[in-house]
Image (cartoon, coloured by chain):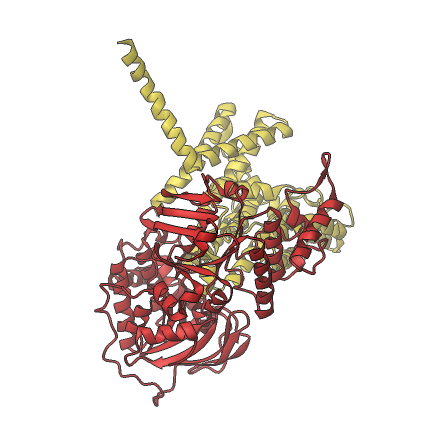
Amino acid sequence: MRRLLGIRLIWPIVILVGLLVLNVIIEPSFFTVRVQDGHLFGSLIDILRNGSPTLLVALGMTLVIATRGIDLSVGAIVAIAGAVACSILAASPNPGSVSTVIGAVAAAIGVALVLGAWNGMLVAVVGVQPIVATLILMTAGRGVAMLITQGQIITVSSAPYKVIGAGYWIGLPASILIAAVMFALAAVFTRKTALGMLIESVGVNPEASRLAGVPVRAIVWSAYLFSALCAGVAGIMISSNVTAADSNNAGLWIELDAILAVVIGGTSFTGGRYSLAGTLVGAFIIQTLTTTAYTIGVTPGVMLVFKAIVVATVCLLQSPAFRATALRLLRSLRRKPVAEGGVAS
Amino acid sequence: MSNRVGEASPIVEMTDITVTFPGVTALDRVSFRMFPGEVHSLMGENGAGKSTLIKTLTGVHRPDSGTIMLDGARLHISGPRQAQDAGVSTVYQEVNLLSSLTIAENIMLGRESRKGPLIDWRATRARAAELLAELDLDVDPASTLGDHSLAVQQLVAIARAIGIRAKVLILDEPTSSLDADEVADLFRVIRHLKKRGVAILFVSHFLDQVYEIADRLTVLRNGELVGEYRTEDILQIELVNKMIGSEYAGLDDVARSGYVATAGADTDPLIRATGLGRRGGIAPFDLTAREGEVVGLAGLLGSGRTELARLLGAIDKADAGSLHVAGYHKSARTPRAALRRRIAYSSENRRDEGIIDALSIRDNIVLALQADRGWFRRISRRRQNELAMSYIHALNIRPADPDVLVKDLSGGNQQKVLLARWLAIAPHLLILDEPTRGIDIGAKAEIQRLVIDLADNGMAVIFISAELEEVLRMSNRVVVMRDREKVADLVNDGVTAAQVMTMIASGEVS
């Protein structure tokens, strides 16, 4: 199984390495990581830091997709979480105190969990199709965020809050550490408990799982809760990075990047087997693409096309049908010269 | 054979039809015919080939050999569309209409009256209303189809079939979810269509209904034609005999012995169902099962065997009566709760409700046990492998590799994996719904032996099979089902297949 997983992951890894090599060719100092004031700096570090919110959202998305679902509302939750945290900080007489920041962060995460519970209830209890259920919050969410911020972009000046998205801990950007810890926790939680196997079982065959005594509803529900938690943390990260809550643009289209990351990572939309490692690679491919496009200096419009081409390539390479056709083509190409030789003689 | 043949020529004449699927001959040189203005019933148990025959007639399957004549002309069916154009119309069990459109739209879809390029809605609705009036259906053509009961939807589907001037109308289990009044309505419509000369193929598991409406019957068994009969010429008992047959070779050595029947004995039963029932599923019944007892459920497909079993396993919710499990005060309301009470239900639908096909043998075996322990208390990988290997050896599962995905296994081995899953939770009561269906004869004998071993070691087993001989060989008690009702509960001290067939056919206990 492990070998098979390796084979499935090989193409995304090849693409990622290819992108990195491309960057080195364009910008020879790409891999250079320098230490300044005890902090690490460099293009790679930037990619990791800027990719952290996408990785977080994709992490939650992986488990949701594994249960045959999808969560379109993550971008809206990003905006709401940022709006909640920033408006609490802005209203506080002492936004610089650590306790205020902890309170604001806790409130934002709490709100995100409530939103996740709402999604989970619609899908697991009411039985609404996941794409429709989460579309509700996707549509309404930015409006809710606007209500919280009263239509303004709220800027905050709070040094401890800024650490989350733009600061450093033990030499590394804090956001990378946070994303790494959440990723590690998710991996441990799904693989060291039985949760991973039960999620896969529910994703492959929900009815058979129910008959085997698997608490299907609770598992589906918790997947949406976890997805919202990840989106909430990502929202805090993004608003901290720019020290502002922008309801219109925070996490805009992040759900699409997250879904792409999951798909590139090889988790199937039909539910069941999923790969957290695949999602990790997928999220880095997406972020490296974005960064590469900026360094090359392509316009945002062209960048989307660029992204689409890379994603399509990865998906094609992963498709067994495409690989079979490609192999056949290759073989016939190789045979051709022989045939020509035959005609000539 | 009958004087009908002299009067008219058949509208449908299928001759020597053979249909094969990889590894299976679904129909073996079967001939079948229908006359205009008759109701014809196709009879047979699971796997007899009924649905293959219907699908061949409707163009879903293409026969490997044989000819299909429709109205005297050779029919070259290459798809469902051609069959429909030739006048063969089908109303399926699950109505395949568009529930969000109006009744008129559903009846006339694709054949709307036109005024130039535009649809003339007024004329379209009028035509739909005419068709409904012809069937004496009192519904508003402008109302949305989905707002009506399944019975009405079915009649609308029939109205649509008449609208496209069907010569042959196939009704596949049309009454399976209708109540008595709705069935009467449907039969009124069927009789009306008969008068118009439509040939109607009526497929139903309800013997009484078949005898009420059908003029002739064709019986299939194991993909072969048993015979064609006029309904009035064949007794129900003969019919059941022909459907079930009695030749099951090679398994006679597997039989329950050494168990002393303890019906009404001093031990408390493990489970006691009192008046347990579910509307539209099964009429209220009483049932007990004791330790070490194999209770066989006999009856035709659709007789309520599965429905009864699903209530015991809390797969479906009962709406009447109670189920008492020894040692528990409250009855289980979910499969999870039933499993906690050590009652396991193994579904007849192995693919959709049994195995998790994309997971490994190991995952499939430990699933129920793991679910019971809770997600947090993971069974260690080593223990998982031990469990999987011990069941792989005990049940002789091939390949003997816990990492192989279950979808790559044969049917018999998948069934064994499923059995291992239930055995792993050490059930007190194991409900096996058709555990031997569709698997090869070797695996079948192995599973039968296993069931007997389990019961000898004190497990209570409820054993369901379409094969009467198998049920009789295995069981200490036989419960007979008929038309969604429990009609008899017999101690198996030499009960014969003939006795049980009489009960299945007539509902009377001899």
- Please identify the quarter of the rendering in which residue B188 is found: bottom right
Q: Position of residue A72 (x, y in %)?
A: 61, 48
Please identify the quadrant where the N terminus of chain B is shown: bottom left
Counting from the top left corner in percent of width and height, residue B3 is at 44, 57
Say whether residue B426 is left or right of residue A77: left
Tell which of A92 and B7 is nearer to you. Answer: B7
Picture residue at 47% right of the left edge, 75% below the top: B485
Q: Image height check: is B266 above or below A279?
A: below
Above or below, B343 against A19 in this view is: below
Regarding residue B508, the answer to whether it shows in the image is yes
- Residue at 46% across, 49% down: B10
Letter of the chain in red: B
- Quadrant where the image shows the C terminus of chain B: bottom left
Q: Can the viewer see residue A42 in this picture? A: no
Residue in view at x 43 percent, y 48 percent: B13
Horizontal and vertical percent for residue A331? Answer: 34, 25
Q: How many marks?
A: 0
| Camera-nearest residue between B505 and A280 | B505
Image coords of residue A281 (percent x, y): 47, 40
Q: Nearer the viewer, residue B68 or B383?
A: B68
Q: Is residue B380 left or right of residue B201?
A: left
Image side of residue B319 versus residue B10, left or right: right
Residue furthest bottom as drawn: B266
The chain whose colour is yellow is: A
